[in-house]
Image (cartoon, grey):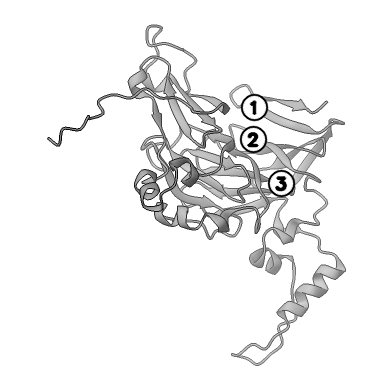
Amino acid sequence: DDGQARLLKLRQGHKAPPTCIRYYGGDTLSTLASGADASCCQILSAGRDRALRVFHTARDQLNRELSQGPLLKRSRVLDVKVEQLKLPPIVDFAATEARHRDWCNIISAHSGEGAAFTWSLENRVIGQNVLRPDGVGSDLTLKKLHADKVSLRAGKFPAVRCVGISACGNFGIVGTADGTIFKYNMQSGRPRGSFPSAADAKLSKEQKKAMRAKRRKLNPSSVQLLTNMDATDLANEDPIAAVQSHPSKHEGAVNGVGVDSLNTVLFSAGYDGTVRFWNFVEHKLESVVDLGSPVSKLVANRDAGIFAVALDD
């Protein structure tokens, strides 16, 4: 009515080279003509343009970019480019078809971010849960997400290097730069422990002394000194500090994580050149394989029960 042009159709891809590509769908058939349905012909792709996109191998009309909120309107108000308001480029992501209609089924790690983010492929939008070790980021609205991005960076928490998701879609796995692995509930975004467990952390004498001094204060209800401090109390206060000195953790960054199809074993590979196998339920280390060279990438085939690693050498 105003005489301006109206957008009818748009075909668009990444504006910068892609960094991660994953096939999405449980069927191995590649085309509709060979018998696959529309949901099995999708490719998830993340690029340096800070976008997470879904491509359809048969129908271009189904290609979409997953929304990060009303960025166009916000960019006009702030007079900045839309790309400047997006999350940093994705360095790793994982997805599963399970429970995709119930809650978010994609988890992503971003460059320099101390938190992982969830996405809903069903709704083509970023989720409200931000996965942080302290559980503060849960139920974060999109408006608060872009206004409080500084608090999510690696200044407070170690940067997230890799992510994984269980076959059932209930648990998200996050590997950090300091060698710790965290487990989260994908529906609520709440932390569900760490690998190694914070409750089993062995503290040095200096750490125990410092924590007792911190807790040695008057209780207003009983007027008593609270001097007792164990690993469980430390885990409740600071889940990262509780496992920093644990002998079972990776000595460098965790560059790959995965979970078997039965949620019994979690396997991780790190820059310390080791592959570690953990009990998924008890969060205890079961075995360690020394590869002799830093691991830069881990890719798993859950159905076949195998995984492959790439070394820096």
Kindly identify the amino acid type of the residue bearing the numbered disc 2: Gly
Is residue 44 found left or right of 111 in the rendered image?
left
Of the numbered discs 2 and 3, the one sitting upstream in the chain is: 3
Kindly identify the amino acid type of the residue bearing the numbered disc 3: Ala
Label drawn at residue 177: 3
Name the residue furthest bottom. 223
Is residue 266 found left or right of 206 in the rendered image?
left
Of the numbered discs 1 and 3, the one sitting upstream in the chain is: 3
- Using the image as rendered, state which of residue 95 and residue 18 is in the foreground: 18
Residue at 68 percent of width and 25 percent of height: 307
Q: Quadrant of the C terminus?
A: top right
Secondary structure found at label 3 = loop
**Nearest to viewer (mark 1 / mark 3):** 3
Kindly identify the amino acid type of the residue bearing the numbered disc 1: Ala
Q: Position of residue 224 (x, y in %)?
A: 69, 90
Residue at 65 percent of width and 53 percent of height: 154
Q: Quadrant of residue 271?
A: top right
Pointer 1 local density, CA inside 10 Å: few below 14, some 14–19, many at least 20? some
Secondary structure found at label 1 = strand
Pointer 3 local density, CA inside 10 Å: few below 14, some 14–19, many at least 20? many
Reply above or below: 247 against 81: below
Label 1 – label 3 distance at C-alpha: 20 Å
Contact? badges 2 and 1 (CB < 8 Å): yes
- Using the image as rendered, state which of residue 17 and residue 39 is in the foreground: 17
Label 2 – label 3 distance at C-alpha: 16 Å
Residue at 81 percent of width and 60 percent of height: 202
Mark 2, residue position: 258
Q: Quadrant of residue 102?
A: top left
Mark 1, residue position: 300
Reply above or below: 79 against 274: below
